[in-house]
Amino acid sequence: MITPPPRPVAIIGAGLGGLTTALALQRAGWPVRVYEQATVLGEVGAGISISPGSGRALASLGLGPALLAASLPVPDVAFVHYRSGALLAGSFDRGRPVDRGFAGARHIHRADLHALLLAAVQAADPDAVCTGRRVVQVEQQGDAALASFADGSEVQTGLLVAADGTRSAVRRLLFDDGPPRFAGQVAYRCLVPRAAAEPFLGAGNAVVTVGPSRIFHRYLLRGGALVNVIGIAKVSGSRPWQSEGWNTPSTAAEFAAEYQGFHDDVLGLIACAPPATLIKWALFTRPPLAVWQRGPVTLLGDAAHPILPFLGLGAALAIEDGIVLARVLQAVPDVARALVVFQGLRQSRVEAVRAQTLVQGQMIQAADPDRGDLGRSPSQDTRLFDYDPSAVAVPAHAHA
């Protein structure tokens, strides 16, 4: 067992990746401090998917029973035609999905998973999470890193993990990878109470509606009390987006305007969405970074490898990163070398998911779904979803 460092590991960002990393390191006996720019950690986001492998890995950290209770099994997903609602692929699942535990994927409200992770981290150390800390500078000082925050405070550490999301300040400060590129896609989201949504759920518990350059996905959350709705639409270059904000308010009329011609279940769900839950955001892409680490600093999750949402594996990749990083740090005594080994273990996995995400997006945003069914999509490839970060072998040469 590697002796934990005398100074706490500094983790920038208290999202899913940052908190998973913190909890995995705590379970291994390492002190951590998580620095989050938000002043309050509240209910943010909506539905996300937890892959079977990520679920098993979170269970290995002691979250299994709570995670099962807070999530729902993912039923068979029906892909349907945008005008008629006719089945293109999958099957109509109108019954209660079979709960296979962590042998299957699960749906959960992001805020519920975040709350589970936060409670576990703070149970191990009530002072582990520091809010109101926006990082403004990161410097390498020999084998240490110095992070400076907007409030004037600083922290020096032997390991700094940047888990600060797609718009990572640490990536910008250390790697200067340039501005993101608008992907020509806009996402809309809302949460609809089940009682209001019921008339529009005839096609089953989880449905992806496929239309010309547009998809519309909905599934159940929180014991079936909520319907999570997300639409992703290609937009013309005549409407460029300058901002990468995640929570721009939208309206039912604006959302519905992108889905004119879609069948009544789609438009009905949009019409009954509570206005406060309606948001939109532009999708941006960044080229992959060749190197995620610099000395005692590493990027993780969306900060290192942001992907588009077509396979729903963004949260899973961040969780996987945190658990693999903690396992490598337990095995490799030199931090700088451990960070190189970490990227080496994760690179092929991340690139495979990135490539298949693009394939999935192209397939389900087909220009003409009238030409036939979808065939076999990457979403049916169990190898993408069964990756278990708690079972990844650390190479023997990593100890050298």
Image (cartoon, rainbow, N blue to C red):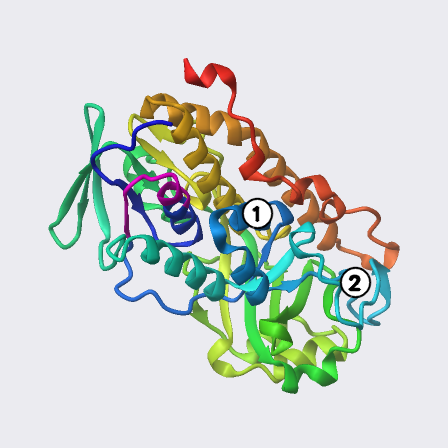
In the displayed orientation, state which residue is furthest to the right: 372
Left or right: 171, with 344 as reference point: left
Query: Where residue 397 appears, x then y in whole percent?
Result: 48, 14
The answer to whether residue 375 of the structure is visible from this angle is yes
Left or right: 110, with 134 as reference point: right
Residue for badge 1: 54
Taking the magenta stretch, the answer to whether it contains residue 34 is yes
Q: Residue at x 79, y 78 (%)?
A: 202
Q: Mark 1 touching mark 2, by CB under 8 A?
A: no
Q: Residue at x 69, y 43 (%)?
A: 359
The answer to whether residue 290 of the structure is visible from this angle is no
Q: Is residue 225 above or below residue 86?
A: below
Left or right: 188, with 340 as reference point: right
Picture disc at residue 349: none
Query: Where residue 132 appears, x then y in whole percent?
Result: 22, 59
Q: Considering the numbered disc 1 on the image, is that residue within a helix, a strand or a loop?
A: helix
Marks 1 and 2, how far apart at CA: 23 Å
Quarter that holds the N terminus = top left
10 Å neighbourhood of mark 2: few (<14), some, or many (≥20)?
many
Say whether disc 1 or disc 2 marks the residue closer to the N-terminus: 1
Query: Where residue 83 appears, x then y in whole percent?
Result: 80, 71
- Residue 371, quarter of the rendered image: bottom right
Eye-nearest disc, 1 or 2: 1
Q: Considering the numbered disc 2 on the image, is that residue within a helix, a strand or a loop?
A: strand
Residue for badge 2: 78
Report the magenta residues as a range.
24-35
Query: Which amino acid type is marked by label 1?
Result: Ser
Query: Which amino acid type is marked by label 2?
Result: Ala
Left or right: 364, with 178 as reference point: right
Q: Residue at x 38, y 61 (%)?
A: 119
Question: Closest to the observer: 234 or 295?
Answer: 295
